[in-house]
Amino acid sequence: MALAVELPGDGSWAGWSGGLGRHWMVEPIGSCEAHTMEPEYKNEWSRRKPLDVGTHNRFDLGPVAATTAVAAVAAVAVAAVLALIIPGLVERHLLEAEAASIQDTVDQIARSIGSDGNLTEANFAQLQVDVEHTLLGREIVRVKVWDDSGTILFSDEERLIGATYPMTEDLLAAFSGELISEEPDLARPENQYERDLGDLREYYVPMDSGTQGVEAVFEVYEVADKLVETVEDIRVAVWTALGVGAAMLLGALTAAGVANARAERRRQARSERLIGQLIEIREDERTRIVGALHDDIGQPLYRILFGLQASRGMVEEDSEVGRELEHLDGLVREVDATLRSELTTLREEPGVEIDLELALAELIEVSEARTNLEIDFESDVDTELPLPHRATLYRAAREALLNVDKHAHASCVTVRLIEGRDTTMVEVIDNGSGSAGQPGLGLTTTKDRLESIGGGIDIVDAKGGGTRFRAWVPVDHPEPR
């Protein structure tokens, strides 16, 4: 395994000069060279982007803020619908109220011109007087009286009197007794004299004689300025209330989000502090165990071994006692070898002053020596991580390499230590048989440790076969080395 490292002092490079910052590189060996694992991230600091990895989520609203957000969205949606519907409903009710008022007036006119409601020359004069006194003059600017043949029998616009036009659906409906209010279609020929009268509303009011049914229909045009102004005032009031309510809900959501973010930061800080204390305690305990194994067990084993060797010299080799002493000698040597192996493993565990790059490089070297894996290592990190982050990433990489050795049936592995704007990630890619099954206790524990300090884990099938393992931790306050 060949490593290229930055030499201290003059900043020159041994073996490779592909990027800014410190860079470790394990050169491809054997089958690793044939296995394509294209890097996904540039080494130039200016091109770094936040790492896009699986379930990575830097902002979590939390249950309270999430509930507030849902309530805010629902309330704004309901308020927006109401803001669109209410002005239309108000206008419709105002039109219906005005139509009912005009209906009362038309009924009075019908009683004034005669009980049977028939229009004759005698009551035309009365009709004109009643229209001028009871209808015209209160925003009503045009009146037409139709018969059931489509002829205008009377109008304050004399040029329309006697003219016949095609019967419209609204006019037919009014002759059937329906009271209609709407915005007029001024493009129709019978409405040519109303085109310059402004914004109008139109009412079709049946004149029911009571005995003969609807004898005529009053078509009444009213200037809608006051109506439009009233509806607009209501619309402004509704939208203002919507805006104020949305602002209050947004304020509540923001406050909940800020409170949750602070609580999350406190939780992460507490987790980091506890993990740091646990690492220090673990380091102290590891040191004590190493010393105890060496002094309390290792030294007595040596004395036992020396005693056995001395005893074997005092008896015949072929005797039963000699053979038993030889067997005990072998057992002691096996125990000694196991003890030495465990002590080596404990000594290889990085301590509280762990340098993540160096620790990963040593881990890879040991892994290559113990397995048949060929491992490439690349690193591009300029920020010193807190101890819990370094230790947790190291253990994640160790767990990933252990799983590759046990389950992946791989021959080649690439390990990358990558830094983005707000995350640092360890990536382990193998060319084995791919991920399968549920994660074991080791991966579950690793995931819990990472999430407790704001990180995460992601395991997917790699392009071209094999498995891509990613573990990341946040970098909230970068401190360049």
Image: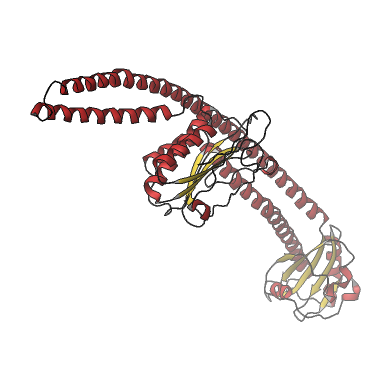
For the image shown, how many numbered marks are present on the structure? 0
The answer to whether residue 256 is above or below residue 305 is below
Residues 235 and 205: in front is: 235
**Picture quadrant where residue 294 is located:** top left
Residue found at x 37% / y 40%: 441
123 displayed left or right of 431: right
Above or below, 373 relative to 220: above
Q: Quadrant of the C terminus?
A: top right
Q: Is residue 219 visible?
A: yes
Residue toward you, 402 or 319: 319
Q: Is residue 60 visible?
A: no
Q: Observer-nearest residue: 188 or 427?
A: 427
Q: Is residue 232 left or right of residue 352?
A: right
User: Which quadrant of the figure has residue 188?
Assistant: bottom right
472 left or right of 333 in image:
right
Q: Is residue 288 left or right of residue 116?
A: left
* Image location of residue 45, percent across then percent down: 68, 40
Q: Say which quarter of the image contains residue 5.
A: top right
Residue 382 coordinates in the image, percent (x, y): 63, 34
